[in-house]
Amino acid sequence: MKQLLVNCRVDGVHAAVLEDGVLADYASERQDPEQPGRSQPGALLGNIYRGKVVNVLPGMQAAFLDIGLAKNAFLYIDDVLGVNLGKGKDKERPSIRDVLKIGQELVVQVMREASGAKGARVTMHVSLPGRWLVYMPSAGYVGVSRKIEDEKQRERLRLFGERMRLREEGVILRTAAAGVSDAALTDDLSFLRDRWLQISDYAKQRKAPAELHREAGLVYRIVRDMLTADMDEIWVDTEEVYEQTIALVREMVPGSEKNVKLYPMGRQAGLFDYYGVNQQTDLALSRIIQLASGGYIVWDETEALTVIDVNTGKYTGTDKLEDTLYRTNAEAAEAIARLLRLRDTGGIIIIDFIDMQEEKNRQRISQRMEELVRRDRIRCTVVGWTRLGLMEMTRKKARAAASAQLPE
C-alpha cells in the first residue's frame, strides 16, 4: 500500500509518502504569517530573480548578487558560463571579473536555498520543471532520465526532444515521461516555453532586485513530483486543498482522482498522528536509529559531510558471523537510503558498514545501495568503497535541512 498524505496546518503544508505504513518521503512549505497562503519570504528553490552584482571575487571565481533577500546570493563562474564553456583539458575558465561587473543586472534562478550564514546559490542556467519534462531555455542539449531503462523508450524520447527543441533550448525528459504520448509531451513543452517567454518579458520591465517567478506551491509540486502510477491513496485533511488536489490530479493524471480522499474532520487524531507520521519523523531525525533486527545506526551530520556508522547492537543473527554481519549491513542499507531522503542529506556521505570478510558480500551491499538510491528524486551517486573499507556517496543538496521543514 502506497499513500500520499497532505497535512495542512497554520504553519504551512506538509506532505508525506508512506509505503506499507513506513515513511518513505517528506516535503513541506512554511507559510508567511503576514501573508496567509504565501510561502515564507526567502530564497525558495526554483524562484527566478533579476539581481544586481554587488561584489566580484576573482579569488573565488564567484560574485555576490542582491536579489532582494536578507542575504546576497552567491553566483559561481560555472553557473555564468555556457553549459560547455570552460570545461575539458584544453579549455580554461575566464576570470569572473572578465565576465561580470559590479552593477550589472542578471536573471538568475535559485539552485540551493540559503542556510546558516550562507545566502542562496543561484545560476544563470534556468530550468523550468513540468509534469513530463524539464525545459531549459539555453542548455542546448536533450537528456533522458537514467531511471528509464527501456532503450526503445529512451530513444523515442531523445528523438522527440531533438525534434521539438528550438535553437539553443534544452530539454530533459523526466522518468514520468515513459509511455506518454508525443501530444502530451508537446503540450508540456509549449506550456513551459510560454512561461519562460512571460518571465523574460517581465524581466525587461523590472529593475533589480526583483522577483520574476515564484516556484509553484507545495500542493502542485507534490502532485507533479510525488504522484506515481502505483499510488493507492491520497489523503488530504482540508476541504479547500482537497478540491485543489482533485483538480490537479485530474489534469496531470486523468483517472487517478478517484484515489483522492478527504480525511474525516471528526476524528480525534489528526492525519499525521493517525498514520504515525509525526512519530516516524522524530525517530528519523535522531542521532541513533534502531534497526528492527536489534542493530543500530549512528548518524553524524555537518553542512558538507555526513558520517554514518553501522553497528550490530543486540543482533546476534545466525551461527555464521559473516551472515550476521551481511544481514545487518543489508538492513542498514535499506534504512540509510530512506533516511537520506527524509533528512534531505546532501554533500559527501561516508558509511562505515560493519567489516565483512567476503568480497562478494561487499559487492552485494554496494549493488543494493545503487538500486536503492535510484528511487531518490534527488541525484544520488554511490562512488564506491574507499581504501579504508568505507562506502563513499554523494547527494545533491538543494533545500533547507529536514529538521527545519518538519511541523512544530
Image (tube, helix red, strand yellow):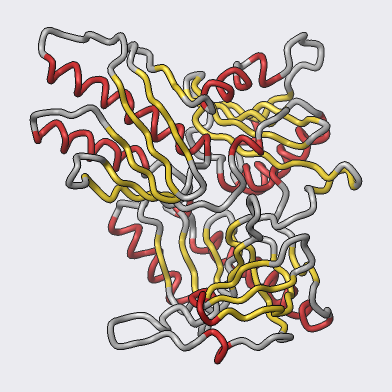
Furthest-right residue in this view: 34
Image quarter (top left, top right, bottom left or bottom right) of the C terminus: top right
Closer-to-camera residue (231/186)? 231
What residue is drawn where x is 56% and y is 27%? 3
The answer to whether residue 161 is above or below residue 6 is below
The answer to whether residue 379 is above or below residue 182 is above
Q: Position of residue 154 (x, y in %)?
A: 34, 60
Furthest-front residue in this view: 59
Question: As drawn, is 4 to the left or to the right of 49?
Answer: left
Residue 340 lies in quadrant = top left
Question: As drawn, is 243 to the left or to the right of 363?
Answer: right
Work out whether residue 308 can be spotted: yes
Work out whether residue 165 can be spotted: no
What residue is drawn where x is 79% and y is 73%? 209
Q: Position of residue 358 (x, y in %)?
A: 8, 30
Residue 8 lies in quadrant = top right
The answer to whether residue 201 is above or below residue 379 is below
Q: Position of residue 257 (x, y in %)?
A: 65, 35
